[in-house]
Image (cartoon, helix red, strand yellow):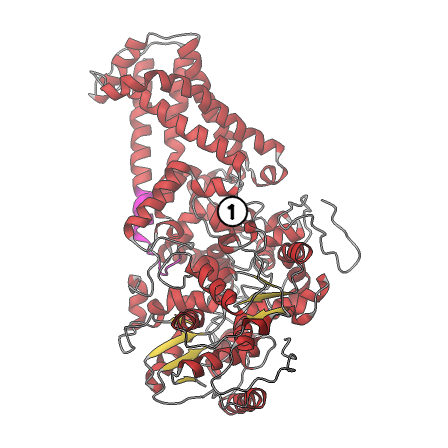
Amino acid sequence: MLSVIYAILFYVATAILVVGVGMKIRSYARSPAPLKIPTTPAPTTVSGVYLRMFREIVFFESLFKANKWIWLFGWTFHMSMWLVLARHLRYFTQPVWDWVVFIQPYGTYAGFAMVAGLLGLWARRFLVERIRYISAPSDHLMLALMVAIGGSGLLMRFVARPDILMVKNYMLGLMRLRIEQLPSDPILLVHLGLVATLMIIFPISKLLHAPGVFFSPTRNQVDNPREKRHLAPWAAKLEK
Amino acid sequence: MAASTSESDDIRKMAHPLEIPRLKCGAMEGLAPFKASPEHQEKLGFPGELVPDWKEKALAKMKELGEKNRAFQVYLDTCVKCGACTDKCHYFLGTGDPKNMPVARQDLLRSVYRRYFTFAGKYFPKLVGARDLTEDVLNEWYSYYHQCSECRRCSVFCPYGIDTAEITMAARDIMDHIGIGMKYSNEIIGKVHDIGNNLGLNAKALRATLEDLEEDLEDETGISVRIPVDEKGADILLITPSADFFAEPHIDGLLGYAKVFHEAGVSWTVSSYASEAANFGLFIGSYEQMREISLRIRKAAQDLGVKRIVFGECGHAWRVGYSFLNTLAGPFDFLDQNYPIPQHIMEFTWDEIQKGTLNIDKSRNDHIRLTYHDSCNVARASRMGDEPGGQFEIPRNVIKAVCNHYFEMDRETTKESTLCCGGGGGLLTDDLMDLRKKGASPRMTAVQQVTEDHGVTHMAAICAICKTQFSKIMPAFGYEMDSIVSVHQLVSNAIILTGQVIDDDEDKSDE
């Protein structure tokens, strides 16, 4: 019974995540940037823009310039999260890819760094007057959700281990549209339930920053307005 | 942190230019510039006064902006409230009003966008800070979206590049479309449509003014240096802010351009039809207005048959000129493609300095100990030369070529991190003087630092708004009105024209 409920939950969550984010991306991609507005100094070539985006996404360059504390917590959280996510690939692949095997120990401990980063960010929402002012309830809830996901994951890894082979079997089954038996450890059920929640709210929340950053005109435009004429389709109609 | 609150002039005393104030909720609440009259509104095609169905109209406009402008949609969606921008706005630093923090300013509009256009805001408004569009919200918009100078300093530091200027422009555009416009900007745009410049200076008056200046130049130098108007067949059309024709220290910059053109041996002209570089269409976020004003430049260039367009010292004009002109009024295939279209006067002068056409005596600026204020729109929304960052280097190169005593301000307040003068973005109006003074205090604190450390006496800028703003507010910070100078004023001081005889005792050129 539980296995079926969670199977439905994950299918629905995945559908919402993929379709929701896909629709948002389509909407971003379809609305033109009518003017050249890169924040300068900006790269003058396309490859330069790729490099700028790379630095932005991998190193959080602008955030580093802005505030070292937010950068430290934010960057630690995000990079750890990638490691943790990558480590989780082992539950979805058989045989497990070599590089996933390699990062396994790092991914495990990255869980602590991830939660620490989140707690740092959360503390700022209480301690820094300016950030307290701009925080809505959803900003706190989002952090609570992520901390709970990270915390429950760490508990399972280091305290109360579920039958991980059974979990893997269940996940592999879901990917093949088969519903296997899911262990009924409460921590596991909480962990999976929260992850599904996160997937569902992704397209309707500020988590859209992940796809959004790629569409930010101040970062992704080439600084070449004198050399190349930039014209939005709706603006071209004004010239008729 | 001690915010001195003496009755009228409560300018913060800051220990350093970026000192973060305590939050002072509501400190600037209710401050709002005069509204445009129905006549000025209608001239731009906007409703004369608040329309009865303003709420529906405003939401429809928001929807339209989402479809027409990617930045609007992406920036409203992606903010994670990390707080990186919260201490970056000069108006926040100067006033402590939390709604002047960039993210909070965006949230004034974002909260409404969420309420009507997002799932979470429709069904869980309290949770995500969404709110209905009410008259109070509208008043708040009018107040705080006229406390942003669209300087883009926040966009430098945002991890997603969210540019509050884009949101401010959108908000002003929405308000214009429901009948609430700002007097200062909209009246000025009307004048440009009617007459060709912000001042309403007609062709006859312009010609007379420039003839007077030619005479002054000849009296001063003994050389006939021309400032031609509407001269067909000239090589270069100079597009410069109309303040250069009448305001100080702007005029001295214009004389500098004239001397440089004279020595370079090029023919040039200003146009009475497009006698304005400033483009306030940018400030009100109107593509259509910006385009109409830009098309005057195209028409002037075609009518006069020029080969090149050069822009004078003006910050946001250079943004529109450099970044948008080709889009709004291009393609400029009828101009000489061997030169940048358009070109900045600073690029032109630096070229001439490198070629060695100018005879320069740097010591003629020795009475000045100078610092340089990067104007926000030049710094963060444009470029000069071929390399990124040329907009920082080229003006400095020119300054150092004509001036012996030059000192940089705190690096966190220059180049891409420069602070706005406090009067940009359509806020250069007397009804916002309180805000202008407070907004200038971070920059003025940086100036005071270099005065203490290096005895700096003057600051140069290449923006008409910066120059007017500083000449107005520098006295409040213990400087003379004329402590703000044009960069081409320094060039003008230092140039010795071909054939000009220098008397040893004429050291009175201390503008």
Q: In which quarter of the image is the C terminus of chain A?
A: bottom left
Please give the range of residues in magenta.
A23-37
Identify residue type, mark 1: Ser
> Could you say where residue B293 lies in the image, as x and y percent from the top left?
42, 75
The outermost residue toward the right is: B7
Q: Residue at x 62, y 48 (%)?
A: B18
The residue located at (42%, 57%) in the rendering is B389
Q: Position of residue B258 (x, y in %)?
A: 48, 82
Q: Is A31 one of the magenta-colored residues?
A: yes
Q: For mark 1, what is the residue? A: B111
Q: Horizontal and vertical percent for residue B362?
A: 54, 71
Left or right position of B81 against B268 = right
Is residue B224 located in the magenta-colored stretch of the structure? no
Using the rendered image of the protein, determine whether residue B287 is visible from the camera's viewpoint: yes
Task: Give how far across and how far down residue A52 sits, in percent.
Answer: 36, 46
Q: Which of A97 and B65 is in front in this view?
A: A97
Q: Is residue B471 left or right of residue B401?
A: right
